[in-house]
Image (cartoon, helix red, strand yellow):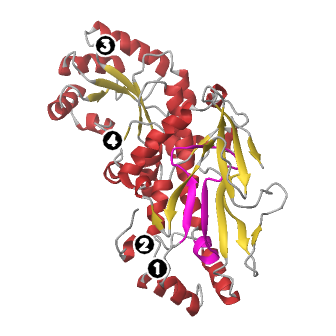
Amino acid sequence: MHSEPAVSAHQTTALLTDQYELTMVDAALRAGTHERQCVFEAFTRRLPGARRYGIVAGTGRLLSLIERFRFGDAELTWLSENRIVTPPTLDWLADYRFSGSIHGYREGEVYFPGSPLLVVESGFAEGVILETLILSVLNYDCSVATAAARMVHAAGDRPLAEMGSRRTGESSAVAAARAAYIAGFSATSNLEAGRTWGVPTMGTAAHSFTLLHDTEEEAFRAQVDALGVGTTLLVDTYDVHTAVETAVRVAGPQLGAVRIDSGDLPELVAAVRTQLDSLGATGTKITVTNDLDEFTIASLRAVPVDSYGVGTSVVTGSGSPAAGMVYKLVARQGADGEWVSVAKKSSGKATPGGRKWPVRLLNESGIATEEHIRIEGNDSQGRSLHVDLMTDGVADDRYVGIAGTALAREHRKAAIAELPADAFRLSRGDPALSTTYS
């Protein structure tokens, strides 16, 4: 099992939350209901953008963030000075350590509307205070991973690199690189994602490097001298075809790749491929990085592109920056100690209450046919989807850190392989699997 060292003030995640989480704890403490055992569940009612499946991402990040959810002197002083909660609640927060259990879908798993992605079992106050943190991680990471998985399928066997750090917040950039990697991207331009999560990094030069030099040839020579002939040269600063000729003359036919970041890509890529071959650079690859998304990537299937770099679209979830996750209390112990299923009944937001056990039903060929969720009792049929992620407040080592990220990436491959062919259509439609309850 996994444990974290003592956390310094600047590392704590305790204030990455909304005020009402703490005021609920304050009120529950006053009422004496804060220790009632509860079951909370994170799920989505629908898939954003009418997509056909979602990819779970963020779990490994979340487990570590929960272990660092501590109120140090600085946080407690700020809460006191701003009168956010009462002194008894400050005392409770000073001793806060999540000690409950968390079950859920493995990171990299496929999910659908109603899938109980994360189940938190704890006292009310211990579990409710984590709501904002859980949703902020799952909503963003699942959105990025789902968009990235669609791009990976559209690209086929051509690799994709995540290059969107400049199109999102600095912390989100790291999370997005990790989520895209889990979903099948091969590399990122973000160095922190490489250091923290083991995502392979890549990158060579931007247009500013070419503009720095008196001529494009000088820029190419400087880059080749520094990085070798296997580098990738950016050829669309001025005239693409002149740049390609210069690139091959400078690096020779062993030039690693050329990158195109603008223009009519289908026509331009075909012309560049022909030009490279005519210059003897038959092994030189072509990568494109011009505002790509899953739809433009799919449109380039018949074009001789070798790899893609995706920025804005992947870090913004390709038009769906949040996955629509909610965090709800679904069961609690009453004053008499008996368990009670609870759920909202408001129009458009009604969901089944109760502790749930999800399984995926497969046909004889190993293709998924249904997401079945049994309430208040396990179901031995199908592939069980829940694993123990955290026990007594301690995260399972397998699912955190660099190793957990790599494991999630591998699991995503297996989960995707179970989906029916209709799941991969890019058009808007119904979820690829129906969700049933019993």
Residue situated furthest front in the rendering: 380
Seen in the image, is 159 located left or right of residue 326? Answer: left
Residue at (58% x, 54% y) in the render: 139
Seen in the image, is 5 located left or right of residue 381? Answer: left
In the displayed structure, 94 sits above or below 322; it is below
Please state which amino acid type lies under the numbered disc 4.
Pro
Which tag, 3 or 4, sits closer to the chain's start? 4
Which tag, 4 or 1, sits closer to the chain's start? 1
Proximity of marks 4 and 1: CB atoms separated by less than 8 Å: no
Residue 71 is labelled as 1
Residue 200 is labelled as 4
Query: Distance from label 4 to label 2 (Cα)?
Result: 27 Å
Whether the magenta-drawn stretch holds residue 128 is answered as yes
- How many other residues sit within 10 Å of disc 2, few (<14), some (14-19) or many (≥20)? some
In the displayed structure, 209 sits above or below 73; it is above
Query: Distance from label 4 to label 1 (Cα)?
Result: 34 Å
- How many other residues sit within 10 Å of disc 4, few (<14), some (14-19) or many (≥20)? some
User: What is the secondary structure assignment of the residue under circle 2?
Assistant: loop
User: What is the secondary structure assignment of the residue under circle 3?
Assistant: helix
**Which residue does the numbered mark 2 point to in the structure image?**
12
Using the rendered view, name the quadrant where residue 369 is placed.
top right
Residue situated furthest top in the rendering: 278
**Which residue does the numbered mark 3 point to in the structure image?**
276
Residue at (29% x, 12% y) in the render: 282
The magenta segment is 100-129
- How many other residues sit within 10 Å of disc 1, few (<14), some (14-19) or many (≥20)? many
Query: Distance from label 3 to label 2 (Cα)?
Result: 53 Å
Residue 221 can be seen in this image: yes
In the displayed structure, 423 sits above or below 437; it is above
